Amino acid sequence: MNTRKKSGPKKIMLVVVALLVAFIAGYILRGPRHRLTPNTQHLTPASSSQAEVWTCSMHPQIRQPGPGKCPICAMDLIPAVTGGEEKTGPSELVMSEAARKLAAIRLAPVERRFVEVAVRMVGKVHMDETRIAYIAPRVPGRIDRLYVNFVGVPVKKGDHLADFYSPELVSAQQELIQAARAAGSRQTGAAPAGSDSTRAILESAREKLRLWQLTPEQIAEIERSGRPSDHITFYSPLAGVVVERMDTFEGMYVETGMKLFTVADLSRVWIKLDAYESDLVWLRYGQPVEFQVEAYPGETFQGTIAFIDPVLDPMTRTVKVRVDAANRDGRLKPEMFVRAVVRVTAADGGKVLQPDLAGKWISPMHPEVVKDGPGSCDVCGMPLVPAEELGYASAEVSAANAPLVIPASAPLVTGERAVVYVAVPGKEGAFEGREIVLGPRAGEAYMVRDGLKEGDLVVANGAFKIDSSLQIQGKASMMQPGEEVEGGRWEVGGKMEEGANAQTHCPVMGGAINREHYADYKGQRVYFCCPGCREPFLREPEKYLDKLRAEGVEPERSP
C-alpha cells in the first residue's frame, strides 16, 4: 500500500518534466526566423537597396541617394521611391481614380470670355457743393426783419430772406442819386467836356452797390425814385432749402461777411462712396451706378460716377468715389446711408466694356454730357475727350480679344507667386504645377497674363490637396518652389555635381533654403534659410561644408 502511494506523485512529476522538455525543444527547433512577420521581411537590406531616393518622414524636402539620418531632426531616413514605381516629373503627381474622387478634384478649362464684375460700395448722401449759396452782408448793419426764421424752409430764386439797414448803404445810395442827377443835367445843356467823367462817376456808384449785393432792379428803382431806401432786402440767389441759419434775430447788428443763411439746391445730390483698392481697376469716370437707401427698401436709384479721389485714405485703405444723382422729388436726404453697386463687363488689358460709351466723347467735368463726336461741353465749355482715354474698351473689341480667365479657386496665391495645377494631356490622373502671372480678379474669376493658354485644364477644386501630396514627396510645390524651365514647369533643386544631391536645406539652421541668401566660398555657392546664417558660415566655412558633404550634398559652383 505504501509503495503504491509513493509511486503516484513520481509519475506526475515525470509527465510534467517531459512536457517542458518537449516545449523547449520545439521552441529551439523553430528558431528566431520563424518569429519574423511578413511585413518585416519587406524592410530587409535586399529590398531597401532598391530605393532610389531616401527622405525624412518629418522633413520631406530632404532627398538623399541612400539610407542615413535626417540632417534636421536626426530621424532614420525611409525609402521614398522604389525601382518599381512610375517615373514622374519634378512637379508632377499621378492620382488614381479613387484618389481623385476622394480629393474631390474638379477641372475647369482655361477660356477666353468677357467677365461680369459687381463692385459693391457703401457711403452717404451729401449736398451738391456746386449748388450751395451763402448769404452774408457786404457792409455792417442791423437786421430789422427776418422772413426765414428756421432751418428747412423751401425758397425759390429771388425770394426775400431779410430786411437790412446800414448807414453805409444809405450814403452809397445818395452818391448814386447825385451822380445820376449830375449826368442828367449834363445831358440837358452843360458842356460836353465833363460828360465822360460824369458818366464814369455814375457807373462807379452803380458798381459799388452791385458789389454790396443790390440787384439791378433795386439800383434802377433808386435812380428812378431819386430817394435812398433806408432798408435793403436780401434775396435768395437760387432755389432750394435753407439748410443753415446763424443765431441771428431781428434788431441784431452784424458785421461784414457774417454768414446769415445757407441755401442748398437739393434737386441734385452727391453720393460719396468708399471703394477698396482692389476694386479701383474696374471703376471709371462716367460709369452708371445703382444704389439703394434704407428709407425706401427695394427701390433702386440711378447715378453716374463724376469723380474718383486721386488720394487713398491711409486709415480705411479706401478711395472716395463721388456719384451725381438726380433728386427732383427730394426723397434723398443728406446723410442717408447708401449701398451701391457698379456692374462692369471686364475686357482684356483691364479695360471696361461699356457699349453705350464705345466710340463716344465725354465731358471731363460733367459726365452726363456725352456726344457722338468731338466738341465742347454744353455746361462748362471744356473740350470733350474720347471714352477710350478714360479706360473704356473701343467699339472694335470682339470675342477674339476677350481676356484669358480661370476660376478664382484654381490658383494658390502665396503673395509673391501664383501656382496652378494643370491636367497633363494624354496621361490620365496626372497633374503638373505651373507658376503663372495673374491679372486682376474679376468676380469669381482671375485674368491670366502669362503661363497658360486657351484650352488648358486647370484644377478648380482640390489644388491644395495635390500641392500637399507634392510637399510630402519633396517635389516642387507652392511652398517649395523649384527652378523654372520652359513652359512654366519646374525643376527641383539647382545645378548638381555628378552623383551628388542638390542643396535643399541650410547647413547652419537646417531650414529650407532661400536662394536669395547665399555665400560664395572657394568657388562654391552655399545657400541659407535666412540672411542671419551667412555670418556664422563665413566664420567656420569648412565645418558647415563638411556637414553638407557628410549628408551627400555638394554645393553649386559659383557663377
Image: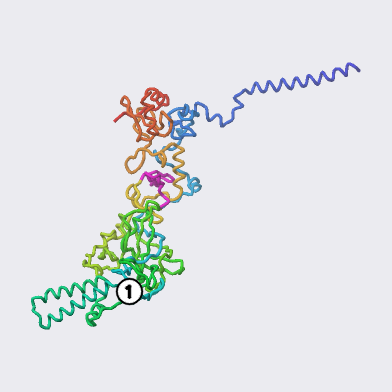
Looking at the image, which is closer to me, 268 or 538?
268
Inspect the image, locate mark 1, and give the three-letter code of the amino acid beneath it. Answer: Phe
Asked which quadrant contains residue 353, the reply is: bottom left
Colouring mode (rainbow / by chain / secondary structure / one colour): rainbow
Left or right, 480 with reference to 375: right
Residue positioned most to the top: 3
**Which residues are the magenta region?**
408-435
Q: Is residue 433 magenta?
A: yes
Looking at the image, which is closer to me, 432 or 307?
307
Image point (36%, 54%), residue name: 111
> What residue would you read off at disc 1?
164
Across the whole image, how many numbered discs are drawn on residues?
1
* Relative height, residue 427 to residue 30 (above, below): below
* Relative height, residue 384 to residue 170 (above, below): above
Q: Is residue 381 magenta?
A: no
Q: Can the viewer see residue 243 in this picture?
A: no
Rendered location of residue 90, percent (x, y)? 39, 38
Asked which quadrant contains residue 513, the reply is: top left
Looking at the image, which is closer to me, 226 or 483?
226
Look at the image and tell me in which quarter the N terminus lies.
Answer: top right
Left or right, 397 with reference to 512: left
